[in-house]
Image (cartoon, rainbow, N blue to C red):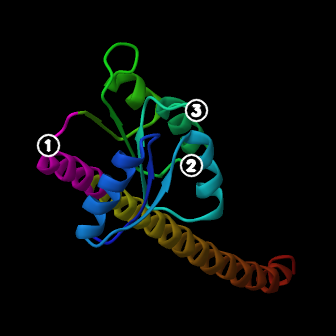
Amino acid sequence: MGVYRILIVDDKEIVRNYLVSVFSKHGHNCDTAKDGLEALEKIKKNCFDAVVADIVMPQMDGVAVTKELVKLYPDLPIMVITGQNGEYSAQSAIAAGAQEFIKKPFSLPEFILRFSKMMHEHESLRKVREKRDEMIFNLHRESSEKIEELKKKIETLERKSYHLEPDLWR
């Protein structure tokens, strides 16, 4: 797992501090926000590699902030956590665009495993997209070169044909 800059969004300071501690021990850099509105402000001013957000928060819950983040940064990996049952389900978080969901209380190994999995999948997808874009660029370049080559051949043939035509009419 690489070193990431992570935004942790939770209305409980103890949870924010705990997650900062966990991620820092693994070499990651963290910033925190106490709710979705603060998270949106921070993410507009800073570059983050991932977001870990609680679902139940005042002002803007984790599902709403996930939807907004996905609109702004469609490739940003988002993990949603909650201790609630009922309307805040894994399905609503995933439907909003989160890549991962974990229910509190969770074990530290499970949390790290799920976060690592999310980031690994994100990195793999990024590499696939880069390779695809490189292949498309190369195909476009090669096609353009072939088209230019064919144009030159056509021009050469047209010149030869033009020079031959007067002889045909004599």
Amino acid carrying mark 2 in the image: Ala
Whole-angstrom CA distance, mark 1 to mark 2, is 25 Å
Which residue is at the front of the view, 137 or 91?
91
Query: Can residue 1 be seen at all in this image of the molecule?
Result: no
- Residue 136: give x, y in percent of width and height: 49, 64
Please report the residue visible at 55 percent of the width from the left and 68 percent of the height from the top.
140
- Residue 133: give x, y in percent of width and height: 48, 64
In the rendered image, which quarter contains the C terminus? bottom right
In the rendered image, which quarter contains the N terminus? bottom left
Q: Give the residue number, with chain letter if any, for mark 1.
A: 107
Range drawn in magenta:
105-120
Q: Are marks 2 and 3 in contact (CB under 8 Å)?
A: yes
Q: Which label is found at residue 142?
A: none
Q: Which label is found at residue 60?
A: 3
Whole-angstrom CA distance, mark 2 to mark 3, is 10 Å
Q: Give the residue number, with chain letter if any, for mark 2.
A: 39
